[in-house]
Image (tube, rainbow, N blue to C red):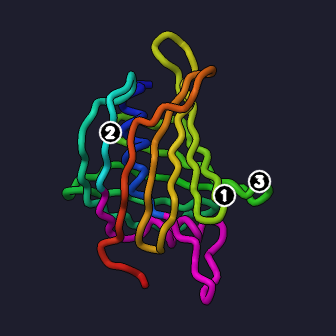
Amino acid sequence: MNIRRSLTLLMVLTIQPAYAGTPATPAPTGLDRIAAAVTGTWNTEAETYSSELSQAGHQTLKVERECWKSGEALKCLMVSDDKLIAENVYTYDKASDSYRERVLTAQGAYPDFTLTIKGDTWTYLEEIKSKQGDTIHLRLVRIFKTPDSVESKTDFKHDTGDWITSATGTETRAKPTS
């Protein structure tokens, strides 16, 4: 697994907005919760920082996502500039109240992400191996500000050591739901 490719994909995942519902409208649950969050057109601004896994830079993306249920899974296509970026396949484990996300791209499948949602905070975790065989932990934390606005931060760390921030960003839904 190319570490920079995996980190780049994790940054692109910041395009997946959160949806927690409002006091007047209960939040969807299970896979419906993911579908309500990611469907639509989103504008993303991200800053990446110089690290062993990333290069400093600025990224602006407009992404459209269409989702549908297929059996026990939710499938979503992510498109930018009329090009397919990825197909995301989500499953939900009700017992642990967590999700698994498989990301498929033209370059192949990525290791599965584990997604947990606590209130307005969505946390994606993934482990990858470096060329030297060491485990690198990736974490994307997305904080839901409104149904149409998200702030995100991508970090990584080795088995020992502190989390190192490699990217931060904001997302806004192009056509607000509220």
Q: Where in the figure is residue 161, as x and y percent of width and height?
A: 59, 22
Q: Where in the figure is residue 170, as x and y percent of width and height?
A: 37, 58
Q: Callout 1, which amino acid?
A: Tyr
User: Left or right: where does residue 25 sit relative to residue 104?
Assistant: right
Question: Given contact means CB atoms under 8 Å apart, are the residues at marks 1 and 3 in contact?
Answer: no
Q: Callout 2, which amino acid?
A: Thr
At x 56%, y 15%, the residue is 134
**Figure check: 19 above or below 81:** below
Question: Given contact means CB atoms under 8 Å apart, are the residues at marks 2 and 1 in contact?
Answer: no
User: What is the C-alpha distance between the residues marked 1 and 3?
Assistant: 9 Å
Q: Secondary structure at mark 3?
A: loop
Residue ID for mark 1: 92
**Quarter that holds the N terminus:** top left
Q: Where in the figure is residue 135, as x and y percent of width and height?
A: 58, 21
Residue ID for mark 2: 48
User: What is the C-alpha distance between the residues marked 2 and 3?
Assistant: 32 Å
Q: Which residues are magenta?
A: 18-44
Residue ID for mark 3: 96
